[in-house]
Amino acid sequence: LDTRLLKASSLVCRDWSIVAQKLLFRHVSLRTDAGFASFQAAVNRSTPRSRTLADCVMRLDCVVDAKQPQGLTQAAFAKAVTMCPNLAELSLTLYGGPMPTVEGFAEEPTKGVSTPLNEETTSLLRAGPQIRSLRFDNWSGDHSALWQLLDVWPSLTSLSLGGVHPSLPSPSQHAVRHAFTSIKLNFPTPPSADVMKALLHSSAHSLTALDLQREPSPELLQYLLTTHASSLTSLALPSCASPDRAAAVLQCVGLQALRIDSPGTLPSVLR
């Protein structure tokens, strides 16, 4: 959407305003408490117009950073989600500390700061809409946050993950029962095959799209392509230059789309 054009259109007249605002509110980004206050005032459901705008929100992008004094708080993020009854897609970036140091990302840790998803936050999220698509970039020190969010939304079918990769779920956490159709991974260091086995426990026959933004370990790639070869129709890899990697890709006989970012691809794969 051309947001500049729509914002200008919303100022032309009343008839143009509501049409432009309905389009603008399809995709909302929140990064500060001030932004949340403005959003809350616009969609508080006290008027027909505010109810209309709340119902228009289909995608919400939120950044929760405990180190920003004026940043979006967990409570505000959760309340924003509950205000959007038709929300289908959520993008959440979670910052906090102390920050783990990983290859390609290093930051001075902030002493005493942490951003676990607390019980109040997860309770509010459960009371909100059941979204289908989640993009979660976790740069906090909370390795359990992903499993908490999966427990909140059993409706998820599409998942995009980045930041610091999760650890294995604890025995007290529920088994992942989601039948994902699409997975995208963008971790600076690859997760273990055991983590992905836990995440994709119920997706052996449902996963059709796999997008690996960074180089996976040989063990991880072998697990993913061997387990899901029969169902994958779309695959994206950073490279495919080794015979072992080519052999793994060639297991996916049902592919309709293949993206390889590196030009050094073996001819056997292209054929």
Image (cartoon, rainbow, N blue to C red):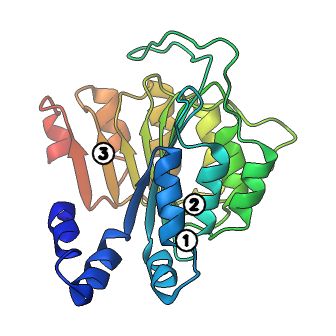
Q: Amino acid at mark 1?
A: Cys
**Circle 2 SS class:** helix
| Position in image of residue 135 (x %, y %) | 47, 50
* Above or below, comparing residue 84 to residue 151 in the picture: below
Judged from the image, the secondary structure of the residue bearing numbered disc 3 is strand
Question: In 3D space, how far apart are the residues under numbered discs 1 and 2 (Cα atoms)?
Answer: 7 Å
Name the spot of residue 19 as percent of width and height, x first: 28, 84
What SS does tag 1 mark? loop
Residue 194 x/y as whole percent? 64, 33
For the residues bearing labels 1 and 2, Cβ distance under 8 angstroms:
yes
17, above or below 136, in the image: below
The answer to whether residue 212 is visible is yes
Foreground label between 1 and 3: 1
Residue found 49% across the figure and 79% down from its top: 50
The residue depicted at 45 percent of the width and 25 percent of the height is 217
Any mark on residue 270, and which?
Answer: none
Amino acid type, residue under disc 3 in the picture: Ala
Q: Earlier in the sequence, mark 1 or mark 3?
A: 1
Q: What kind of residue is marked 2? A: Ala
Q: Quadrant of residue 69?
A: top right
Front-lying residue, 207 or 88? 88
User: CA separation, marks 1 and 3?
Assistant: 32 Å
The residue carrying mark 3 is 236
The residue at 52%/36% (across/down) is: 70
Q: Which residue is mark 2?
A: 80
